[in-house]
Structure formats: C-alpha cells, structure tokens
C-alpha cells in the first residue's frame, strides 16, 4: 500500500514528482510541439497547412536579401516532396552558416544594419524547417568561397568547404519535410504559386522563378487587387504609394468588407493594427472629403482593398505571423497616425483630382445608407427575437476557444453548420468541445438569390447564423477560423450546401475571400473484414478497399451523417478530417454564378443537370461492367 501511495494521490491520478519534470532541447521541443512554431500540420490540401509555412520561412529570408538591395532573382522548385530555394543575395556568412540554420535564437536580424524592416525577427523560422525535415541542405557562396552543410531531422550530417568556385553569391536551401511528423502530404503548386505572386506584388523589381516560370509585378498591390476582383468595380481601382506604405482600393456591388493586409511582405490573414488603422482612416478621410457625417459602415460596405506597410521590429501575435500586434511603425510613430496621415493626404488628393470616381463613390455610400436605414427597424426586431431563442443551447453548441481568443488553439477553432437532429447529434457527440462548435439548421435554408440584405434579419435561421458567427458588423469579429458546411452526401445535402454557399456569396463574400468557408467531406462507404476497416470517400477508394479486404469484404453505404456512429464520426472531424475550401477568384463572377445556379432560368439549368447526369451514368456503368 505504501508503494502505491508513493506513486499516486488520493484521486487516483498519475504521479507528479521530480521524475515527471522533463527538459527538452530546442530541437526536441520543435519536433514534439511543431504546432507552436508553424500552426497546424495538415496534409497540403489547405493553403495554411504547415508545409507551406515552412516554404515561406525559407523564402522570407531570400526576400529579405532583396529588400536590403542584394539579389533581384529568387529561384524556387517544388518537385515531388522536395523544395529548393536559391537566392542571389549576400550569402549567409560562412563561419556562421551551420549555426544560422540549426541553433535557436541565432541570426542577423536582432538589430544593427544588416537587416531592417524584415519579418524573420525571432531566430526560429529556418531552424524549424531544418528540425522538421528528414533531409535539409544549406549552401552559401560568398566571393568564390562556399560552404555546404547537410542535416537530418536537425542533426548535422556533413560539412564541406570549397574555394575558387565560380558561382554567384547567394544562399541555396533544399529540404524534404519529415513524414514521421507530417504523415502523408503533397504540395498543391497553386498554393505555392499564390505565395510567389504575393511576394512579387509586394516587392517591385523582384523576379521569382517558380518551377521554371517567371513571376514579376509591374503595379504592386494594384495587380493583386485586380486578380482578386470577382466583378467589375464601380470605379477604376485607386492605387496610392508612399514611403513604407502602399494601398489599393475599390468598391463593388456586394456586401461586406474584404482586405488583403501585409507587413514587411508577410500576409496577415487575420489583420491586426495596420488593418484596423486603415479601416478607421479611410472612413475618416472620406467623411472629411465630402464634409458629411457618413456612417463608417456605409463607407466601407462592399470595399475590397489591400494595404501593405513596412515596420521596424514588428510584433506578431504568434510565430505564424498572421496578425500584427505592433502599435508603432517605428519608435515614436504610431501605426494609427502613420496610416491616417498618409490617407488623409493621398486619398483626399486623389478624390479631388478624379471627380468622376468621387461622384461614383458618394452614390455608393448614399445607396448603402438608404438600405441600412430601411432595415434598421428589422434589425432591432431580429435581435429581440434572437434573445428569446436559446442560441447557446439548441441552435449552437459552442466551443471554448474562438478565433478572437489569445490562444495557440485559436487558429483551430471551427463551427459545423448541419441540418437535422441526427446529424447535429453525431457531430456534437464526436467533436472536440475546446475548438469545435455545432450550429443546427432547421430544415433547408431559403434561396436568397435576388433578395436584399433585409432577408438576413427577416429569416430567423439566417439571422441566428450571422449572430452565431458574429459577422453582422465586421469580419474581424468572426468567432471561428473555419466555417464548415456539413451535410449528407445526397441530393438534399448538396442542395443545402448550395443554398448556404449562395447565402455567404451574396451577403458575406469576404468570409469566402478570407479563406474561412469549407465543405466537410464524409465517407460514402465503409469496407471491412475481420482484420481491417477502410472508410472510402469515392468509388475508386471503395474499389481499392474491396481488393485489400478480399472476398470477405463487408460494404456499408452511408446515406447520411446520422447513420455514422459518434465513435466513427470522431475520426472524420479529427486529425484525418477532409475539407474542401470554397474559393472565389477573378474567373468566378459571383453574380453570374448565382444567377445560373440559383436564378429563375429553370430550363437552362435543367439541361445542364441532364447533361451531367448522363456523364455520371456512364461512369457508373463503367464501374459495374
């Protein structure tokens, strides 16, 4: 009994004594807790997966060389599971080469004049890449001298010095992400291409060759804005540049606000102090220009804008650097005054010089104001109704950690939107209550195409949904990083997906532009025998599973989410969750898409469905033949 008491307490929990205290080396900590350094791991199917963070950590260093005036070209290759980056900058000092990529808190960005207004300030990035890679090579060339060091999982394997080399100065890094940590993964080159484009938009004069193709921007953020416009803007986009700041501004016909914000070349997907300062400054400048006390929401509704600033020693709210916390651009200069002074001068001058644009913008503001006042009474009634509904009981089973929290798990917060008691019950019992919430729809949503935003408040389901997400006033308040539509994989489920996607496209397109809307993929089949169980998301996966299980294969077809037991469902919304991100680009005109799929063109749409059903029918016939 005494022996038991020495190792347990009266509650029966695990022993907590000196042996339980463990000290990890930096390498061990990074490999044990990679999420603290690169966010989620992922499998490469989403643009914020860890393998793309690692690519960016390496490329950031090469871009910093360009910013400091050293090297105008960067070469990036992604082939199979190996990434290589070659810049033509100054090259890492040779004696410090191994330490620079393997020893934490070692680097040239802790002050002095070697680097200014860069992103990589914590001495962590490339070390994390090294320690999370099964193979890592770094080579630096400086004035005919070269040094090459190789590593495996952060441990040095070889070190070679050379003299009299004829290569141009610069640094080469090649790495292969460690599958022991990341599991199965694959690079989506479209995501890497977008990273490359952003680098060129933010660094005029920089050429990046990615897998043999050259990328360069002539117009900076104006090029970025034009790429992301999904409709013809109401006026030619406004492009303003100054020292350490650049903005591009346009208005469309939809709802919401959409921003692309950057700090020292880093895309801050969750905004921060610079984006807040921009939103405040544009409203103030426009009100002063027209000498009208317009509501800021009327000025900003349907805006799509990009803002880039360069900051001395930026402070981010996490190692993944997706939200800026710095309140100053440089010592003694506040972010608010810096952005505000720039816009009050440059935007005011622009509107005076372009009266046609000023006239169109004012009409848009007045139209927004008129619609807002029309629905103000409806909003008040809708809020009263929402208070009477048990929003945090039956409609929403909330989670503990949200996107707006200061928590390392904030980026993992998500909400599943589902229909029916059985489906919401399965997800609720299977979820992680720390980061996963559930919103239960009552029946099919309304087809909102062609309706004004009044319907958001008049329709109880839509009103409660926007309140649950907290997106009524601004997207910065969005409570969940991922908004996931989770429906049955049948005709009704597909219809609900379409109706909900139409709702967000029409009234909250910036939720989609910000990369927050997803579709949950759930298995269609379970194939098993006495030894193995496979969950299959397609006919092809089912065929392969049947081959593995042999003649004794038992096949179950899942018709709805409610048919999947909570124990099984936990697998599908856990580590191996499959999500399809909903994307919109310039090639996806929102109004035309909505009009075709949700409008009154029944005959045209019927023909489209019949044609595609025939194709599906042929595939099914081939499968069974």
Image: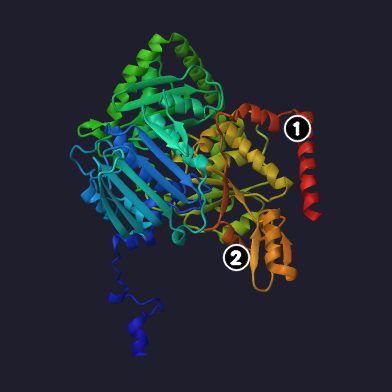
> Pointer 2 and pointer 1: residues touching (CB < 8 Å)?
no
Crowd tier of the residue under label 1, counting other residues whose Cα lies within 10 Å: few below 14, some 14–19, many 20 or above: some
Q: Is residue 460 visible?
A: no
Left-right relation of 266 to 49: left
Label placed on residue 605:
1
Is residue 157 at all visible to an observer of this figure? yes
Q: Where in the figure is residue 69, as x and y percent of width and height?
A: 27, 31
The percent position of residue 620, horizontal first and vertical second, equals 78, 50
Please name which of the two marks, 2 or 1, marks the residue nearer to the observer. 1
Instruction: Residue 2 in the image: state x and y as whole percent.
Output: 34, 89
Q: Considering the numbered disc 2 on the image, is that residue within a helix, a strand or a loop?
A: helix
- Tell which circle, 2 or 1, labels the residue nearer the N-terminal end: 2
Q: Which residue is located at x 43 percent, y 58 percent?
A: 178
Is 412 on the left or on the right of 498, as rendered? left
Residue at 75%, 32% (x, y): give it. Answer: 605
Where is the C terminus found, in terms of image quarters? Answer: bottom right
Question: Which image quadrant is residue 313 in?
Answer: top left
Q: Which mark is residue 567?
A: 2
């Amino acid at each position: 009994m005494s022996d038991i008491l020495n190792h347990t307490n009266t509650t029966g929990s695990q022993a907590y004594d000196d042996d339980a205290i463990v000290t990890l080396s930096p390498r061990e900590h990074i490999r044990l807790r990679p999420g603290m350094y690169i966010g989620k791991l992922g499998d490469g199917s989403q643009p914020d997966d860890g393998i793309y963070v690692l690519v960016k950590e390496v490329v950031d260093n090469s871009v910093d060389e360009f910013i400091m005036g050293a090297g105008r070209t960067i070469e990036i290759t992604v082939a199979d599971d190996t990434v290589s980056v070659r810049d033509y900058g100054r090259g890492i000092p040779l004696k410090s080469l191994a330490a620079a990529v393997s020893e934490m808190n070692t680097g040239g960005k802790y002050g002095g004049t070697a680097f200014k207004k860069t992103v990589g300030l914590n001495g962590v990035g490339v070390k994390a890449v090294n320690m999370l890679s099964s193979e890592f090579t770094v080579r630096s060339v400086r004035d005919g001298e070269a040094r090459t060091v190789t590593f495996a999982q952060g441990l040095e394997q070889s070190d070679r010095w050379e003299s009299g080399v004829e290569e141009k100065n610069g640094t080469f890094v090649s790495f292969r992400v460690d599958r022991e940590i990341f599991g199965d993964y694959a690079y989506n080159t479209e995501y890497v291409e977008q990273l490359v484009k952003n680098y060129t938009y933010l660094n005029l004069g920089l050429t990046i060759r990615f897998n043999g193709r050259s990328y360069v921007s002539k117009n900076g953020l104006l090029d970025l804005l034009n790429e992301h416009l999904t409709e013809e803007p109401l006026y030619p986009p406004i492009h303003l540049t100054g020292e350490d700041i650049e903005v591009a501004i346009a208005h469309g016909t939809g709802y919401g606000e959409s921003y692309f914000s950057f700090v020292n070349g880093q895309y801050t997907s969750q905004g921060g102090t610079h984006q807040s300062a921009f939103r405040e400054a544009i409203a103030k400048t426009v009100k002063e220009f027209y000498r009208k006390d317009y509501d800021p929401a009327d000025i900003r509704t349907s805006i799509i804008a990009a803002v880039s600033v360069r900051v001395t020693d930026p402070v981010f709210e996490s190692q993944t650097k997706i939200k800026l916390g710095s309140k100053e651009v440089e010592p003694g200069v506040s972010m608010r005054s810096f952005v505000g002074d720039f816009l009050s001068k440059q935007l005011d001058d622009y509107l005076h010089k372009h009266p046609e644009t000023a006239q169109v913008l004012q009409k848009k503001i007045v139209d927004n104001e008129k619609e807002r006042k029309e629905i103000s009474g409806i909003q008040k009634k809708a809020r009263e109704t929402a208070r009477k509904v048990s929003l945090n009981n039956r409609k929403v089973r909330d989670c503990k950690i949200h996107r707006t929290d200061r928590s390392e798990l904030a980026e993992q917060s998500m909400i599943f939107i589902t229909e029916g008691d059985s489906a919401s019950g399965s997800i609720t019992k299977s979820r992680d209550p720390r980061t996963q919430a559930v919103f239960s729809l009552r029946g099919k949503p309304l087809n909102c195409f062609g309706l004004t935003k009044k319907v958001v408040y008049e329709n109880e389901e839509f009103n409660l949904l926007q309140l649950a997400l907290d997106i009524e006033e601004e997207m910065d308040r969005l409570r969940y990083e991922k908004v996931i539509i989770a429906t049955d994989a049948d005709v009704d489920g597909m219809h609900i997906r379409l109706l909900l996607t139409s709702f967000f496209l029409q009234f909250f397109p910036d939720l989609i532009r910000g990369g927050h809307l997803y579709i949950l993929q759930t298995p269609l089949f379970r194939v098993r025998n006495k030894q193995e169980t496979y969950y299959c998301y397609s006919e092809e996966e089912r065929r392969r599973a049947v081959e593995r299980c042999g003649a004794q294969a038992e096949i179950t077809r899942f018709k709805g989410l409610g048919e999947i037991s909570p124990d099984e469902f936990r697998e599908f919304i856990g580590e191996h969750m499959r999500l399809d991100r909903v994307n919109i680009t310039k090639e996806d005109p929102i109004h035309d898409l909505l009009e075709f799929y949700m409008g009154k063109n029944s005959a045209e749409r019927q023909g489209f469905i019949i044609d595609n059903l025939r194709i599906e029918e042929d595939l099914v016939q081939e499968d069974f033949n």
